[in-house]
């Protein structure tokens, strides 16, 4: 999980170290306001052959707010998360909490 962490330098360090020791699931949420820093870090990891990790090796979960109700709003929220995370797809999208 990446809850409560907004400092891009710490996010980069923690995610890279986690991947180095075998973590493959990254969990975030729109409300955490750290998707962009996570996306930057994931791009670094995926482009660095020393990590020996491809996108398909990772499981990326994000969560959208329950206020993003209906297909159009939910789709827009997911597309925004994809842009911030700099990814082509997510492995799981959850409603963050019951609304």
Image (spheres, rainbow, N blue to C red):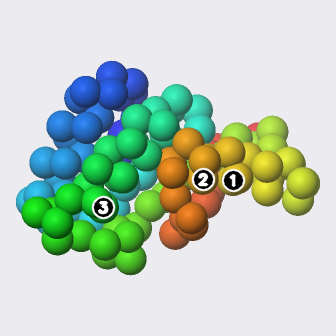
Query: Can residue 21 be seen?
Result: yes
| Badge 3: residue crowd in 10 Å (few <14, some 14–19, many ≥20) | some
Q: CA distance from mark 1 to mark 2?
A: 6 Å
Q: Position of residue 63 (x, y in %)?
A: 59, 49
Q: Disc 2 on helix, strand or loop?
A: helix
Q: CA distance from mark 1 to mark 3?
A: 21 Å
Q: Position of residue 46 (x, y in %)?
A: 30, 61
Q: Position of residue 40 (x, y in %)?
A: 39, 42
Task: Left or right? Give the position of 33 relative to 83.
Answer: left
Q: Which mark's residue is nearer the viewer, 1 or 3? A: 3
| Badge 2: residue crowd in 10 Å (few <14, some 14–19, many ≥20) | some
Task: Left or right? Give the position of 35 relative to 20.
Answer: right
| Pointer 3 or 2: first along the chain | 3
Q: Disc 1 on helix, strand or loop?
A: helix
Residue 82 — which label?
2
The residue at the point 20 percent across, 59 percent down is 48
Residue 78 — which label?
1
Asked if marks 1 and 2 touch (Cβ < 8 Å), the reply is yes
- State the residue position of label 3: 46
* Quarter of the rendering containing residue 45: bottom left
Q: Which mark's residue is nearer the viewer, 3 or 2? A: 3
Q: Position of residue 87 (x, y in %)?
A: 52, 58
* Quarter of the rendering containing residue 4: top left
Task: Left or right? Give the position of 22 relative to 43.
Answer: left
Residue 37 — which label?
none
From what the image shows, is residue 89 above or below residue 12?
below
Depth check, front residue: 87 or 26: 87
From what the image shows, is residue 88 above or below residue 72?
below
Query: Can residue 92 be seen?
Result: no
Q: CA distance from mark 3 to mark 2?
A: 16 Å
| Badge 1: residue crowd in 10 Å (few <14, some 14–19, many ≥20) | many
């Amino acid at each position: 999980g990446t809850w409560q962490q907004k400092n891009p330098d710490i996010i980069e360090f923690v995610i890279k170290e986690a991947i180095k020791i075998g973590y493959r699931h990254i969990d975030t949420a729109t409300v955490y306001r750290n998707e962009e820093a996570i996306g930057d870090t994931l791009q670094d990891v995926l482009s660095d052959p020393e990590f020996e990790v491809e996108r398909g090796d990772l499981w990326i979960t994000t969560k959208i707010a329950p206020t993003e109700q209906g297909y159009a709003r939910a789709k827009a929220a997911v597309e925004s998360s994809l842009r911030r995370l700099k990814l082509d797809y997510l492995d799981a999208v959850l409603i963050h909490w019951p609304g």
